């Protein structure tokens, strides 16, 4: 496997709206990020992935872009961005932008022109269809609820929006659209950014037949089979690679909903003809039930292991993995996969970190994960700001699929807003995030769970992450070693080994609050060195509750 800087890096995702507010308006901003670069430098991360900071009306918190080459006023100015980029680079930290080109905002000038008339030069920048039997062109449902088609009475036609109706999908069949996107990307690269995380990039090629789908739950069909990994997606990405990506030294990762292992080998092939890596979601969906993600059930270890091991072993030597437990679209890792009770929050957060950072692939840390931040557990719908969560509550309760009480339980478990509450910097008012009124409520536990407290405590989750990152920089085996699964029949333990040039690394993690039998470390005391563990002392033949242990032989 060819060595690359982005394989050896640790990425830190920032959700700008919730990271740090420098001007007291209750919204995080670019200057707030710049003010905290020393914190990230102390942690040891190599790359910041910025969720979108472009001009946007904020229907979907910045993932609806109205101008790709301007900065959202809430976040500051282009001068503020340039200063952030320069200050990050001065510390050896790279900046990766979020690229959202499956769709734009309906307030983007392209769409404003597109909807003016059917013969407008920009009409074909988007996907317009004639009515079918007096209604929508097909029965696809949008990801945020309702139909994926919005009627335009002026032209008596519909436009496609896979997400909100204010997020019309771009028509990638149009060569001019692709050319405009590539020119915009090159503009950012020339400015000096270091890569792109590509939002829902697997959705840019649609099934050209636009067929009706099967309706299983509600009035609309799941559109994923018809818009994910479509017939031309690889051709488009290879063209993007030729026109832009190959001309710069970039980190590229594609958010690839519905991706299979075989598809991932094409997106992130070792020849580098498309992307560096993809985000897959199978491990995020192992607890999904009859209503998809809307469940409060927890992932079972055998199912979680099967997915993690599949991606590790089947991409080995063929494509590169991205490693993550949470991001801006997922609940907090320690609440979902660990135990966020006072007794086990710290120990289980360290266990999850160990498990992820010793696997093969590039690890991503989501802001606050290094502090063990937890789900918000909001009690009322009015506390939520996320368009997906609010629409899902309304859709499921209106259709009487779930009661309001059941739906609130699901939101507490998996709503995207669990990841979007403000960063907890210290124990002062509003957690040091803002001097104003926060755009969304803070998690009340900021008084005890915050960066200031953890930086002062040598045994904190923050310092544990710092050690994990330092180990990655020291040992090639953590980055490039071959992955071999262990204990594949255990209901509670996740274990594996890594091998490289005569070295062997053995990792084992207990995902339960009970002591579990585990003998894989027996006899290693004389031959190996313990790299890291979340317990100071071990008991022979067992792993203690949420214990994680890594030995290098």
Image (tube, rainbow, N blue to C red):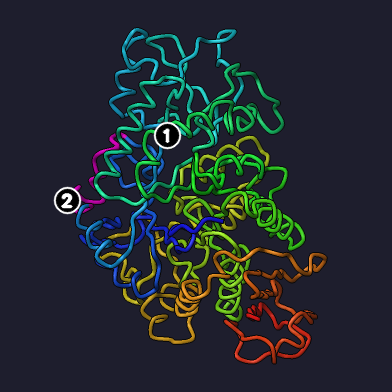
Q: Quadrant of residue 306?
A: bottom right
Dots 2, 1 in contact, CB < 8 A: no
Farthest residue to the right: give it: 489
| Foreground of the two, 434 or 33 | 33
Q: Quadrant of the N terminus?
A: bottom right
Give the percent coordinates (x, y) of residue 325: 56, 60
Left or right, residue 4 beside residue 93: right
Q: Is residue 373 above or below residue 225?
A: below
State yes or no: residue 402 in magenta: no
Q: Circle 1 sits on which residue? A: 240
The residue stretch that appears in magenta = 66-81
> Which label belongs to residue 523?
none
**Where's residue 20, x and y in %?**
30, 63
Tag nearer the camera, 2 or 1: 1
Name the quarter where the C terminus is drawn. Answer: bottom right
Decide which of tag 2 and tag 1 comes sooner along the chain. Answer: 2
Question: x, y percentage for residue 552?
Answer: 63, 80
User: In this picture, is 29 found above or below 526?
Assistant: above
The residue that mark 2 highlights is: 79
Classify mark 1: residues with Cα within 10 Å, few (<14), some (14-19) or many (20+): many
- Disc 2 element: helix
Residue at image x 34%, y 52%?
Answer: 194
Percent position (x, y) of residue 58?
Answer: 35, 41
Tell me if residue 72 is in the magenta stretch. yes
Q: Is residue 525 left or right of residue 149?
A: right
**CA distance separating discs 2 and 1:** 28 Å
């Amino acid at each position: 496997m060819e060595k690359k800087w982005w394989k050896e890096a640790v990425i830190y995702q920032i959700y700008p709206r919730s990271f740090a507010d420098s001007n007291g308006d209750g919204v995080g901003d670019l200057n707030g990020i710049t003010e905290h670069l020393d914190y990230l430098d102390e942690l040891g991360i190599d790359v910041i992935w910025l969720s979108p900071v472009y001009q946007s009306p904020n229907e979907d918190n910045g993932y609806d872009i109205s101008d790709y080459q301007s900065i959202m006023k809430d976040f500051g100015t282009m001068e503020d961005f340039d200063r952030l980029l320069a200050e990050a680079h001065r510390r050896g930290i790279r900046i990766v932008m979020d690229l959202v080109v499956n769709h734009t905002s309906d307030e983007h000038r392209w769409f404003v022109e597109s909807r003016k008339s059917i013969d407008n030069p920009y009409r074909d920048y988007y996907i317009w269809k004639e009515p079918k039997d007096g209604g929508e062109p097909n029965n696809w449902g949008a990801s945020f609820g309702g139909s994926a088609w919005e009627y335009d009475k002026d032209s008596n036609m519909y436009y496609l929006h896979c997400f909100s109706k204010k997020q019309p999908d771009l028509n990638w069949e149009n060569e001019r659209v692709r050319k405009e996107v590539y020119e915009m990307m090159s503009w950012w690269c020339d400015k000096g950014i270091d890569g792109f995380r590509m939002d829902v990039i697997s959705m840019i090629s649609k099934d050209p037949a636009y067929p009706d789908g099967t309706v299983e739950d509600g009035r609309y069909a799941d559109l994923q089979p018809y818009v994910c990994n479509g017939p031309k997606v690889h051709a488009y990405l290879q063209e993007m690679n030729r026109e832009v990506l190959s001309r710069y030294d970039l980190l590229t990762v594609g958010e690839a909903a519905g991706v299979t292992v075989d598809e991932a080998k094409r997106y992130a092939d070792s020849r580098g003809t498309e992307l560096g890596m993809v985000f897959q979601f199978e491990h995020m969906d192992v607890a999904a039930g009859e209503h998809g993600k809307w469940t409060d059930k927890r992932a079972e270890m055998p199912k979680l292991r099967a997915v993690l091991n599949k991606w590790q072993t089947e991409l080995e030597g063929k494509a590169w993995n991205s490693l993550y437990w949470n991001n801006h679209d997922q609940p907090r890792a320690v609440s979902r996969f660990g135990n966020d009770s006072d007794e086990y929050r710290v120990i289980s957060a360290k266990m999850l970190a160990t498990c992820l950072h010793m696997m093969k692939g590039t690890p991503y840390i989501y802001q606050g994960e290094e502090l063990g931040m937890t789900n918000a557990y909001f009690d009322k719908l009015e506390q939520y700001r996320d368009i997906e969560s609010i629409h899902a509550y309304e859709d499921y309760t209106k259709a009487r699929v779930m009661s309001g009480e059941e739906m609130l339980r699901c939101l507490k478990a998996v709503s995207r807003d669990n990841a979007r509450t403000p960063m907890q910097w210290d124990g002062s008012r509003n957690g040091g995030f803002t001097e104003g009124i926060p755009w969304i409520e803070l998690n009340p536990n900021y008084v005890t769970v915050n960066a200031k407290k953890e930086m002062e405590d040598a045994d904190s989750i923050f310092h544990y992450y710092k050690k994990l990152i330092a180990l990655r920089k020291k040992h090639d085996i953590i980055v490039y070693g071959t992955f071999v699964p262990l204990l594949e029949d255990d209901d509670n333990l996740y274990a594996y080994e890594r091998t490289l040039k005569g070295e062997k690394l053995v990792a084992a993690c207990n995902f339960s609050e009970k002591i579990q039998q585990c003998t894989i470390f027996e006899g290693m005391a004389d031959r190996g060195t313990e790299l890291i563990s979340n317990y100071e002392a071990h008991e022979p033949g067992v792993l203690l509750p949420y214990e994680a242990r890594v030995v290098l032989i």
